[in-house]
Amino acid sequence: MSRRLGDLVTKKMKHYILTILLFLTFSISAQKKTTIHILNADRADYDERLGRDVQRLIGNVVMRQDSTYFYSDSAYYNERTKFFDGFGNVHINVNDSIDIYSNILKYNGETKFAELLYDVVLKDDSTVLKTQYMTYDRVEHLATYPNKGTITRNDKKLVSKKGYYRDDTKVLYFRKDVVGTMPDYKIVSDTLVYDTENEMMYFYGPTDIYNKKNTLTGNYGWYNTETEFVYLDRRATLKNKEQSMTADTMFYNKKTGYAKALSDVVIVDTTNKAILKGEHAELWKNIGKCMITDNLRAIYYEDTDTLFAKADTMYVYFDTISNDIQRIKAFYNVRFFRNDVQGKCDSMHYVLADSMAYMRKNPVIWAEDTQLSGDDINIKTRGQSIENLRMQPNAFVIQQDSIKGFNQVKGKKITTYFKGNDIDNMYNEGNAETVYWLRDDDGSLIGVNFSQSSEMDIKIRNRQISNIRFYQNIKETLYPEEQLKDNMEYLKGFLWLEEEKPVRGEFRF
């Protein structure tokens, strides 16, 4: 059994060896050998010092192999080995489409491989390659320079330490210290591939694209030189002097100024002292608009404090010349935190020109131990502080008493004025109501005061109601605490939202 198996294996091995030999024979025969023809030389002789097979050609030398022509001032040609060296004004014309020039040529006619030295120039349509040493493989259609070369194509110039050019596919490969210069921008890369037929550049290493206004940085991607559309991956950054946007993946159209950033997006604005993070951002630079969404978080680092915010989506509108922010819109589950003030709403619009913030859909603000709410809240700011705050309609202000209970102010419209970071006074208009716990100087409770009027002007001192001035239809009653019953100390609509108050810990950055 084992002997039969051995015979079978031997037969199979013989079959495989025969197949390989036939393949090799076919491959060798397929590599067609061609003759090198001497078409012209002003003078020809044999140099005995170099051997009987070496012919010396002098003056207007023209040689041909296949459809490729070789020109030089002089040459040495070895008929046996099919090697020849050309000297002075070397010119190779490949298939009537590619021209290569140099001072010295070393050519192997068997392998169709050329070495060119000193002032080497390759021209292929509008593509021009210049270097001091280059090899050219006619079989592989491959030109290679190992030590610095310059390629120009129309208005583009690229320099690299190493490079390759495939003349059949019209593709250029650049390696190490790649610098590309165009009329409006500059490219610096580690590895770059340029498909000249499709005007596409591909990056395979750290790459920077510069123009007068922006710098685009990435580690992998491509650039369409006609449409000026860029794709960068493996962490990309678009930045100018004041702003930067970084993400795992980025698309950018230089002509329209449009950019899209995806995954772990970080936007930094040094002018407006802001940092925004999310998972998806889009920039319309030419119209002055930016959008960021999906797990949005923001920091505004002010001189005296830092404001943290988050929402589902935020739009930022800015001046296209100065890059100064003009408006900010935030939508869905908006929450913000600063040490002295916190807030929440469903949508918020901030206009920098008039320093106004507009909170809509269930807005609530907390300032120290005071809660302010209404159907709408408009905030007027001055510098980094709130100047006044207007709530309407269904305005409600709740302040937790220092010992027990809640002081309350309710009306159609309440305007709250601040001094520093503390409430100074409130003006209550329309069906004004108050409940406040009246205390003596020692903190002992005098009673719970209930009041109603058309309007009220309420003064606040040391974060407590110190004085109320009533206007029209005045009603006021003071109850001892023991006479309170059935939750009468709470105005209709009372809702203490302490559990919904934003806290620093939820704003993870």
Image (spheres, rainbow, N blue to C red):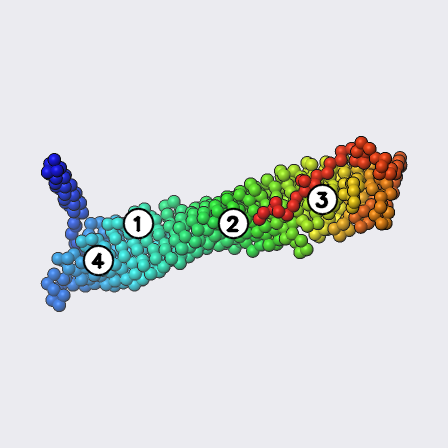
CA–CA distance in space, label 3 to label 2: 34 Å
The residue identified by callout 4 is: 107
- Label 2: element kind: strand
Of the two numbered discs 3 and 4 in the rendering, the one whose residue sits closer to the viewer: 3
Residue 246's disc is 2
Crowd tier of the residue under label 4, counting other residues whose Cα lies within 10 Å: few below 14, some 14–19, many 20 or above: many
Query: Is 506 placed left or right of 86 in the picture?
Result: right
Give whichever of discs 1 and 2 has the lower sequence position. Answer: 1
- Label 3: element kind: strand
The residue identified by callout 3 is: 366
Residue 278, x across and y down, in percent: 55, 44
Give whichever of discs 4 and 2 has the lower sequence position. Answer: 4
Residue 26 makes an appearance in the image: no
**Which residue is drawn at the image coordinates 48% and 49% (left, top)?**
236
Along the viewing direction, whichever of 394 and 208 lies nearer the viewer? 394
Give whichever of discs 3 and 4 has the lower sequence position. Answer: 4
The residue identified by callout 1 is: 167
Q: Mark 2 and mark 1 in contact (Cβ < 8 Å)?
A: no
Give whichever of discs 1 and 3 has the lower sequence position. Answer: 1
Give whichever of discs 3 and 2 has the lower sequence position. Answer: 2
Among all residues in the image, which is located at the extreme bottom? Answer: 49
Query: Is 226 placed left or right of 453 in the picture?
Result: left
